[in-house]
Image: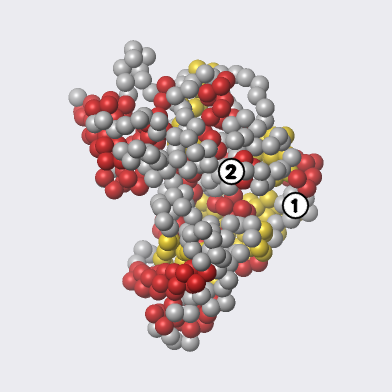
Amino acid sequence: MIVNGATVEAEVADRTLLVHFLRDVAGLTATNVGCDTTSCGACTVLLDGQSVKSCTVLAAQADGREVTTVEGLAAGDGQLHPVQRAFQAEHGLQCGFCTPGMVMATVSLLAENPRPTEEQVRTGLEGNLCRCTGYHNIVRAVLAAAGGAEGQESR
Amino acid sequence: MIPAPFTYQRATSVDEALDLAADGGEDAKFLAGGHSLLPLMKLRLAVPTVLVDIGRLGELSFVRDEDGHIAVGALTSHHDVVNSALLRRELPLLAHAASQVGDPQIRHRGTIGGSLAHADPAGDLPAVVLALDATLVARGPSGTREISAADFFTGLFETALEPGELLTEIRIPKPGTAGWSFQKFTKRAIDWAIVGAAVQGDQVALVHMGSTPLRAAAVERALADGAAPPEAAARAAEGTSPPDDINADGGYRAHLARVLVGRGLAESRSRSGQGHT
């Protein structure tokens, strides 16, 4: 499996879930296990560029594929990804538990729809729950990231 | 939660998948996107001993125009169904209903074939293919056969598929110019339907009004006899056996069916003749 650009090889039990492979084998613990029932989205990562809930994917299903976790978003020099910067600037988090999943779901959403309306952001993040109910700032952060990313490109 | 132990095998062709399933015996299951099966396995509601992963069989992921009908590969993800220009043009009911399944992450992984083979009476797509008079194509050790959607759903989470038989393709006749509507009543965005209704012209199917998806036969008969849509919709719960559960009792579901079919017929008629060239 290629995780955040680096090959990670391991023999694991057939029933190993992707989220456990990422946390326990690859040592990437930013991806959280929340509900463990495909509901909350805390475990969202990118599989070949698309958002997936890694509690409901077998590690074996991701064998040989590209997985991106929130640890893989920042540039090599430590510069945060535009979506991470927007979440920081707009205070798109409270306790932070849902944030890695929110950020990854946002990256996937903006890849499919770079200029979403507010309603499209809200439906686009319907698979991610924030138990602090901090949705308003999360939506603002996504809209800011959408505007900001375009601003960067036009520079 | 992790599933009980099983042996994972990955197929590289449909033939190999059928062989692996046959070797695996009665407790072998096909794994597509895994978004129905893996949650059940984590809860020990399904305990297959062998999982045959068909997730990389590109030959089963397609949407094709075949003159009289549209052919959709069983492994086509909900995401790809939603975004297929062909389906949006020819079968907007299916493309729209697929956009109402789960959430974006689930739609990236979940497949149309997996959803139909899972046969959850609360699932959206079983009722949609039933309303559309689809034909389901299955391949098994003894060859290929076609099963009408009306014969496919045989009970709660049960289908006409034999052990070792793989759903490969869904063939849906082009509905012509009739309008369509998909109505889904949920408490929260990502929930299963408490009740839903799929409408294509005068063909109406119900979600979660029995142990299988159901055609609203009394509504269809009333429309055929010339009843006005609101009058026909009032008969939506006839012949159904809606379940009682934590979300709703059967009486409330019957009420929802009448309301949703009424809205669906009204919306369908308002769209009639639109969306086709």
Q: Is residue B43 left or right of residue B84?
A: right
Q: Is residue B1 above or below residue B239?
A: above
Q: Is residue A104 visible?
A: no
- Chain of residue at mark 1: B
Q: Amino acid at mark 1?
A: Pro
- First in sequence: mark 1 or mark 2? 2
Residue at 58% in and 47% down: B36
Q: Is residue B108 above or below residue B211?
A: above
Q: Is residue B135 left or right of residue B81?
A: right
- Chain of residue at mark 2: B
- Do the residues indicated by labels 1 and 2 lie within the same chain of the protein? yes
Residue count near mark 1 (Cα–Cα under 10 Å), binned few <14, some 14–19, many ≥20: some
Task: Identify the residue position indicated by label 1 in the image.
Answer: B163
Q: Where does residue A11 sit, x and y in percent of width and height?
A: 66, 21
Near-viewer residue (B18 or B204): B204
Q: Where does residue B218 sit, x and y in percent of width and height?
A: 52, 80
> Label 1 to label 2, Cα distance in Å?
21 Å
Q: Secondary structure at mark 2?
A: helix
Q: Is residue B214 above or below residue B221?
A: above
Residue at 80% in and 41% down: B23
Q: Secondary structure at mark 1?
A: loop
Task: Identify the residue position indicated by label 2 in the image.
Answer: B39
Residue at 74% in and 49% down: B164
Residue at 65% in and 32% down: A15
Residue count near mark 2 (Cα–Cα under 10 Å), binned few <14, some 14–19, many ≥20: many
Are the two marked residues, 1 and 2, in contact with CB atoms closer than 8 angstroms? no
Q: Is residue B161 visible?
A: yes
Near-viewer residue (B25 or B250): B250
Q: Amino acid at mark 2?
A: Pro
Q: Where does residue B144 sit, x and y in percent of width and height?
A: 71, 55
